[in-house]
Amino acid sequence: MKNLLGIIILMLMVVFTSSCSEDFLEQTPSDRPSEDVLFASLEGAKIHLIGIYSLQNYYYGEGTRGIIAPDVMGDDALVVSSRNYSRYIYFYNYSFTVNSSRPWNFWRYSYRTISNCNLFLEQIQNIEGDEAVKSDLMAQAYALRAFSYFNLVRWFGETAYTDDPNGRGIIINNTVNNLDGYNLPRSTVGEVYAQIIADLNAAEQGAVGSDYKGFVDASGVAAIQARVYLTMGDWANASKYAKKAYEGFTLIDEATYLSGFSDVSSEDIWSQKFDDSDTNIYLSIPSFTYTSDDITYDEDWNGPDGEPDGVIDYYDVYIGKRGAEFVFGYNSIRVTRELIDLFEDTDFRKKMFPINLDPAGNPIMLDPANGIVSHARYTTADGHLTTKWKSRTDLGTGDFSRIRASEMYLIEAEAEARLGNDGPAQAALLTIQQRADATVTSVPETGQALIDKILLERRKELFLEGHRFFDLKRLDMDLDRTASADDHWSDFTDIGLADPNIVPKNSVSQRFCLPIPQDEIDSNEALTDQDQNSAFR
């Protein structure tokens, strides 16, 4: 047991070792123990697979940034304009260059995941042992490779599949120990999706069910398939796999929903574990949101000198309500008033947006005549607080949802509506709406009105779960922050666009992608500067 533990610790340590190698797609990774140690048995192979999951969950990759960044690149969330520690402002402002470290980290850790999956899938073939166990482990590796390619093509692909599958995608590399393996050109978006589907089909063949949701099981594979087919506009398969994914899962109740998605629940299909013993707690998801209760203010909103300063911050909080747990972490992500107003007062999800209270515990009214309460801000006047994500105990600890059954119902609803099957689409949408608001008894909309309502529900149910940017891209919609300009502080004229609040849809602007890291272009003999995404040339 001590030897096994030592290998696990070694694996986790080397997985997170930062490398300055310019060969992003290096096929003999230096960040892993020797193959003879890892692949001498199925137990060793499992350790390697745990390391791949650790790469997938890394906070600079898909673990934290992959959840938060797509939403701050949308219209419903933002990062505060001050005291933001320069985290997420480049995503929020779309202000990347070819040398930006943020896109580089997405590229780097996704291709590290792919490289390790390639190695795993080759080496496990030579291990003797239970064939059913081998098949399940291989299914997980195929699924993780597919998930990495999926994220890469959505981030770096110049076009959406639904707009132009022949557009420039990313690099496909499924080889191992080939010193020339990284000298590969960009494949088309369509070719990348063909690879993703092939990997997921392979995963589907070997995947089994599991009570532990930290790994990708059969339901997790189906959930990824549903996401992929939705993004491709393959509505029949999107609905098919969404239903397969949510089968056997139960939607959580109000109390569990409002607890902050920090524990595996009955609707979690795939979750990611954060532990303060091996994770930077300040780079965890809850570090960037608000984890406390409604905010009680003094009669006067004061500054550090006791005089009113017009900024709502720690000095304004009623002294009897201050506590050590009031604000954790960076606390720098906010949502817009426009998003909050999408929720009816009878919808329990609206409780995820704290309100301002006076010392007597009464809500401070924003519009007394119409009964509109003041939703809480903190430190700056940018946006409003949300308790969508919380920690289990200490900051950053928890098993945070990566894919929930509710998303699958919404995929089914959209897919069926686009197929013209209003009845099944209405039923799937009603399942989500009634869970959150008992006053909803039916969905009367049909046709395009039904599709619009489903897309609106996606914004409400899945905000800050890593979807909004990708929805705007696949639907070829403008990013338009005009309606919530009072909350937003971005100015897109700084990146050469005409309107300070609008990024034109991707088919027009080609701005819904990240730049290919310049180091990759410089080190990859198959690429030149002309292979850079157009918006960054």
Image: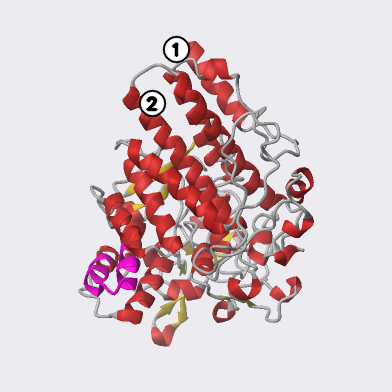
x, y percentage for residue 383? 56, 69
User: Badge 2: few (under 14), some or many (20 or more) residues near its Cα, within 10 Å?
Assistant: some
Amino acid type, residue under disc 1 in the picture: Met
Say if residue 398 shows up in the picture: no
Q: Nearer the viewer, residue 125 or 337?
A: 125
Relative to 263, say whether 153 is above or below: below
Q: Which mark is residue 1?
A: 1
> At x 68% / y 81%, what residue is drawn?
499
> At x 55% / y 60%, what residue is drawn?
70
Q: Nearer the viewer, residue 500 or 132?
A: 132
Q: Nearer the viewer, residue 122 or 31?
A: 122
- Which residue is denoted by mark 2 in the rendering? 134
> Spatial distance from mark 1 to mark 2, Cα to Cα?
22 Å
Disc 2 on helix, strand or loop? helix
- Magenta-colored span: 412-428
> At x 58% / y 80%, what residue is drawn?
482
x, y percentage for residue 233? 42, 65
